[in-house]
Amino acid sequence: MLERALALTAGQEIGDGDLQLAPTRAPMAMTEPMCRLPLQERLDAVEKKAILNALGQTRYNRTAAAKLLGITFRALRYRMERLGINDELDSKS
């Protein structure tokens, strides 16, 4: 990669553009209130958001959501119960 960049560079120094690296994804920005939470609460919030997103994408098909998340249906059911997601879904109905 460096040899190619050296051969194609117009100047004396190899710049960022000469390397032609693929842009990296920016890390997920943490909102200020979330930064103040204890670690376990932050992890629970991230996990809950991922589960709710997967459920939304699959029209609340729990088997499909578990597959989308790469976990078993049983693991999804346990996590939903632990995070109180079942209660939230029941209250929306």
Image (cartoon, rainbow, N blue to C red):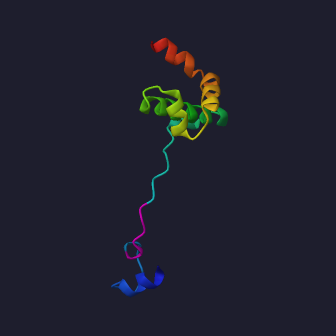
Q: Where does the image place residue 58, in percent across and percent down from the top left?
A: 44, 31
Q: Where does the image place residue 42, in percent across and percent down from the top left?
A: 60, 35
Residue 58 sits inside the magenta stretch: no
**Residue at far front of view:** 63
46, above or below 81, in the image: below
Span colored in magenta: 18-23
Q: Nearer the viewer, residue 5 or 74?
A: 74
Res 70 → quadrant: top right
Residue 23 as seen in the image, left or right of residue 40 = left
Residue 2 as seen in the image, left or right of residue 46 = left
48, above or below 88, in the image: below
Q: Residue drawn at (42%, 69%), measured in percent from left and top?
A: 21
Q: Nearer the viewer, residue 91 or 20?
A: 91
Residue 22 sits inside the magenta stretch: yes
Res 80 → quadrant: top right
Res 10 → quadrant: bottom left
Q: Residue drawn at (47%, 79%), measured in percent from left and top?
A: 1
Determine the main secondary structure of the stretch shown in magenta.
loop
